Each structure stands twice: as structure tokens, then as C-alpha cells.
Image (spheres, coloured by chain):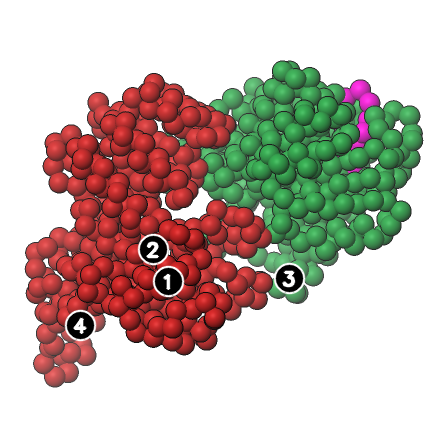
Chain colours: A green, B red
Amino acid sequence: MCSAQEDGLIIGPDDLILITGATGFIGLRVVENLLDRGFRKLRCFARPSSDAARLEAVAKRHHQAQVDVLTGNLLSPEDCNAAAKDAAVIFHLAAGTGQKSFPDAFMNSVVTTRNLLEAALRQQCLRRFVSVSSFAVYSNTQKPKRRLLDESCPVEARPELRGEAYCFAKVKQDEIVSEYGKRFGTPYVIVRPGYVYGPGKPAITSRVGIDTFGIFLHLGGSNKIPFTYVDNCAEAIALAGLKKGVDREVLNVVDDDLPSSRQFLRLYKRNVRRFRSLYVPHFLSYLLCYLWEKYSGWSEGQLEPVFNRKRWHAHWKKTGYSNDKLKARLGWMPRVSMAEGFKRYFESCRDGKRNA
Amino acid sequence: MLKIAIVGCGKIADAHASQIQRIKGCEIVGVCDREPLMARQLYERFPVKQYFGDLTELLGEAKPDVVHITTPPKSHFEIAQLCLERGCHVYVEKPFTLYEEEARRLIALANERKLKITAGHDDQFTHAARRMRTLVQNGFLGGAPVHMESYYCYELERSYAAALLGDKQHWVRRLPGKLLQNVISHGIARIAEYLTSESLEVIAHGFTSPLLKSLGESEIIDELRVIICEKEGTTAYFTFSSQMRPALHQFRVFGKENGVVLDRDHETVIKLRGKRFKSYLEKFLPPAVFSKQYIENLVSNVRAFLAKDFQSKSGMKYLIEGFYRSIVEDGPLPIPYREILLTARIMDAIFEQLNARQLPPRALPAVSIGSAEELRHESAAVHPLGSRPIRAVEGKARVVHLLEDISGGE
């Protein structure tokens, strides 16, 4: 671990750092990472309904540091002002997740981000705003390097047509962050993790397949899945907020040695639980998405357009991923190997199953 | 071309925009939210001409004929009043207003300005609800309803429950009827449609479910049972529950001759035959008759689906269409004003009783059974919402407070 005094960082160990979504799956690890690095003044922002017990446990392990937990709602400008007060770096991880409603996802991602940016602007002491985005924003079409998806790839121009509220909200969140960068000179970095996995998140990503009508439709096949282990991802986010020379950059986060969807599914079944799955070849999944999209349009939304060609391109098209920029610009390396990450993940899934 | 505007760009506004764009002869000329980003996101996702962050700008620039109000309930009255004053017809999402008095004033204003106003009770316009209405209108019940039962249950979504329980400032908590006010009007409106008298008794019993209590909640009432009686007339039970399963959305209406069961979740209407079959036939024939009816319902639903008319909010489309038609043709409204007012009146009476029950014991009115007049006087003095009187029932009607309810026993 590098020390906070290390050259090449934009802040010192006693500068105040704000982390929103600090009790979340990734947020908690970011807090831990920053404390491990020797930062001593952390303000953790969480919703009143959040369970702060694990955060408190992390804070106790680093008793030399000052970890304040501030509860509130980022939809409230007053709460944002209180949160952003004197913050030198803001790690913005809070977001609306798992919401099917576009307005809800938008409000909890974009309006909250705007409020926080406004609050930071008023403070005039912000040195970096780290906005945590997602691979979901990429259209995965018209890529400059054919099958390789990296930071130069285009994002969805019409995210509302993808049928995913999360994608729409994240595209708009990225837009507003870069708009504040252009208009007000807000120093920002956008971090786009792939699929973040690890203990505490038992779901299988839809990039592998979907569980429906009692059978798991395996859609990924030989596609590489852009996994990033939660600790590796937290490390990348922490570095993105600390390292000099990456302002206004976009950084994708994926681990090395990515498995194929088929490999992952085999490992999952072997290590966690057996279940029936049916492989759907790519041409067939594309056709089904196409037909669903057409029917949805023809029937005036009788079936929501949740499956469509845009989503197929983003989720199920054969794609390669790069973390070269992350390594080159931040000096990041995945500390937890894919094998070790899966071992921990499968163990937690088994424990969860036992406790269920 | 009818010019439409939507005020309030949250979740339900999506449903309005989706259904409005399915209706011919109208266009959305503007959307408005006091958070302009929210207005913009709706504008970007639907065929909308302009977006605004200020209502007066919307009314002045877009000049809509009809305004749909999809804001949180607390602002319904003020926004509707302004829109009516500016000459717009108004569609107000449920609950129509916070109090009956506000509903009465809006309707009076609409009448005075020769404008139209309606409430978003779109559940009453689903395919099944319309089939049931036709049956009742054709005399299937054999006269006015004798008794009704309305179940309107609610599966508290984990995320919603967490947000509501965790946030003591959540807008739902600030409604006079809290969670119930935001949810029950569909189920109450079903009863109101078939009530014939203005004079009602309302007996409400509500409590916080053991589940919510275990999560540390004591303010939110999520279990409600209501008895509604017309004087010497129709009676009704209303049930709201967040805990019972299945989470029913059913309406049962019984006349002197026959009954009907409407199931919103399954989109079915089942006729209940009043006359019995002879002897053992009563055990064999009804199951066969019910099977036939369920198959007919299945066919009807499949037909609607194939005709691309089975959207989850298709009831809203019929209500909006009916409302627009009444404006264009100056015809009858899809929901009579009387029904909107009765719904508001019953809800007022329910919340008044529930709120009185939540008062500290010493401040409670010492009433076990009393007149509405008595209740008004007594509860006005101690009402937790301040000086605004909540009207329970009018005239000779009686409100019954069960003493054990008031004292907080469950």
C-alpha cells in the first residue's frame, strides 16, 4: 500500500474526503482502502435507512482516523452542502440501483449528482470529483478497435431506447459531470467498472444469462465477462481520486484473466449449486431481442422493451475488454486474482445459501 | 388537436405520457417539474414539445387545454386550482386532494369556469372493470347493491419500505392518512361508485403490522379494515393489508338476485348466481359454470392482448380518452363528481378516526358512539393537524368510534 504522503497524490493524509454510498457494496471497500492508505479524515454519507454497522466496524479497526458518518438524502441541497463542506475529494458512489422506473433511477443518480456538484462548487475547495459510472453506458457498437471495448468507445446516444433505467441514468450522470467540468472547471474523473462481483452480491450477471420461467437461459456462451473483484474495483476508484494527472479522464475497470461466460457458469454450478441451464446461441438471442423490440413497438408497449438490439449489443455481443489505461495512468494492478476472487465469491454464495 | 401538459415528472408521469401518446387527436405540448432535470428527462423520452421548471411558464407559453397533475398529493389542490383559474381542464392523479373540502372547492371552481376535472381512478376503467359495470348497469344484481367488499392490498416493496421507514421526512409521512392516503383511493372509489346515499357511517380500524413494528415503525398504519354503511341501505367492507397473501385487488358486489366478483390482478369478472340448483346439482353444476366463466375471461384477455390493448395501464387510457371525449363533445364525465366527493369523504372519515386513535390517551375525545357533529366539535379541538378541520360525514350520519380502538388496544 502506498502512503498518503507519497508523491503523485493530489491530497495529503489530513485532507477531508467525502464518500457517498459509503455503506454500499463498493463504497465500504473504498472507505477501507482509503483508511489503509493512511487517510485520516473521512466523511461517509449514507441514507438514513442504510445499515452502518459494517462501516462502524471498519472505522473501529482504524481508530487513529476520524470517520464521520453523515446520514441524509442527496436529493436535499442542504444535505449535499453539509456533506461537501471542506471536502477535497469526493468519491460519488451513491446511485439508484435495481430500479425499473426511469424517473426514479434518473432522480437518484442524476439529480443527486447535480446537487452534489453544486454543493462542491459552492465550497471552492474541491480537488477532484470521482463519479462512479458503469460499463452499462457503452453502446458496444461502432467500436474503433473492432471487438475491443475500451474508453474510446462510444456511449449510448439514445439510452432511453435501451429499455434499462440504469443505463439511461448512468449516461445522463456522466453527461452532467462532464458538463460541470466544461462549464465550471470542476475537476472530475469518471470511473466505469465492469461487473463488480464479490462476497455479498450473490446474483449472476445478466451478461451470463437470465433466470426465467424456471430455467436459466445461458446467453453469454464464449463471451468474456467483464468481471472486477470488489476490492480491485475499490482500489481503482481510490486511485482515480488520488493520483495526479487524470483529470477529466474516463477509466474502465476490469480485472485480468477474464473468464468466458461458459467457464464462469461451469465453475458456479460446481462450487455453489446445480441448476438447469439452456444455452441460447448468439444468432438466436439476437433474433429474439429483435422480435421482442419489434413487438413492443407494434403493440404500443404491451410488452416493455426490455429486450432489444441495443441491449443485445451491450450485454451479449462477443467483446474483449481492456484495462491498459487503468494500469498505465493509475499504476493499478488487480491485487486479488480471478481465481482467488471466485473462491471468495463462491464461498460467500454457499454461506448465503446455507443461511437462507 | 387537444393540447396536453403534464405537471410532475416522476414515476406515474411516465404512465400518463405512455397512454396519452396512444390516444389520437392530442399532443403533449409541455411537461413541467420544479426540478427542471426531471422535466427534461421526460421530454427526452417521449414526444413532448417543451419542458418547463415553472408552472406559470408552462401555462403561459404552452397554453395547454388539459393539464395532468402527477405531483405528490400535497400539491394537487394548489396546482389544480391554478390550472382551472387559467382556463385548463384538469386530470388529477389519485388521491384527488388531501381533504374532501379541497375536492369540493375544485369541483365548484371547475363548474364556475365551465371546465372539467377528473380523478385518476383508472382502476375503474380496466377491461374487467368495464365489463362488470356493464353487467351491473344491465340489472344483473337485481337492483341496488346490498353489500360490497373491496380488497385493496399492497405488497410493500423492499426498497420503498426501506425508503419510507428510514426517512422520517418522507412526503408520504406528511399526508394526513400517510401511506394509506397514497394507496387506498382506488379501492374506496370502487365502493363509492355504487353508493346511492350521501349519508354514511364509516367505522375504521387500523394498525401497524407486526412486520413494520419489528422494523421499528410505529407511525405508519399498513393494516386497515373499514365498514361503510348507508342508512338503511347498502353496506360495504374495505380491506387494506400489506401482509395478507395473496395481496388481493378484488371487488365483490352482491345484489338481491346475484353477485359479481371483479379481480383486477387476473382481469376476471365472475358472475355469482343467486338461485341455487336443486339438490346435489348445487355441488356439481356451479364448478362447471365457474370453469366456463374463467375460460370466457381467458378468451377475453387473450383477445385484448392480441388486439394490443392489454397494457398494464390500459385502464388509464380509457379514463383519459373518456375525459378528453367529455371535453371535446361536452358530454358526461367518465367519473361523476359525486363519486369523487364520496371517495374523498370516506377517506377523510377513515383518517380522522385513525389519527384520533393515535393521539395520546388523555387528549382523546371521550366518545364511544356519537354524531358527526359531536365528533367534529371534539376532534377539531385536539386535531393533530392543527386548525384545518377534517370533515368526517355530513348531516345525520353517524361515526362510530370503538372505545377499545381509541385507547390503542389491538
Between circles 1 and 3, the one closer to the viewer is 1
Q: Could you tell me if the residues under marks 1 and 3 are in contact, i.e. CB atoms within 8 Å? A: no
* Three-letter amino acid code of the residue under disc 1: Ser
Q: Position of residue A181 (x, y in %)?
A: 66, 19
Q: Chain of mark 1?
A: B
Splitting the image into 4 quarters, where does residue A151 fall?
Answer: top right
Q: Quadrant of the C terminus of chain B?
A: bottom left
Query: Which span is picked out in magenta?
Result: A235-246
Q: Marks 4 and 3, Cα distance to the nearest angstrom?
A: 46 Å
Displayed quadrant of residue A42: top right
Q: Quadrant of the N terminus of chain B?
A: top left
SS class of the residue under badge 1?
helix
**Dominant SS in magenta:** helix
Kind of residue indicated by mark 4: Pro
Are callouts 4 and 2 both on one chain?
A: yes
Q: Label 4: which residue?
A: B286
Residue labelled with disc 3? A353
Determine the residue located farthest toward the bottom in the rendered image. B279
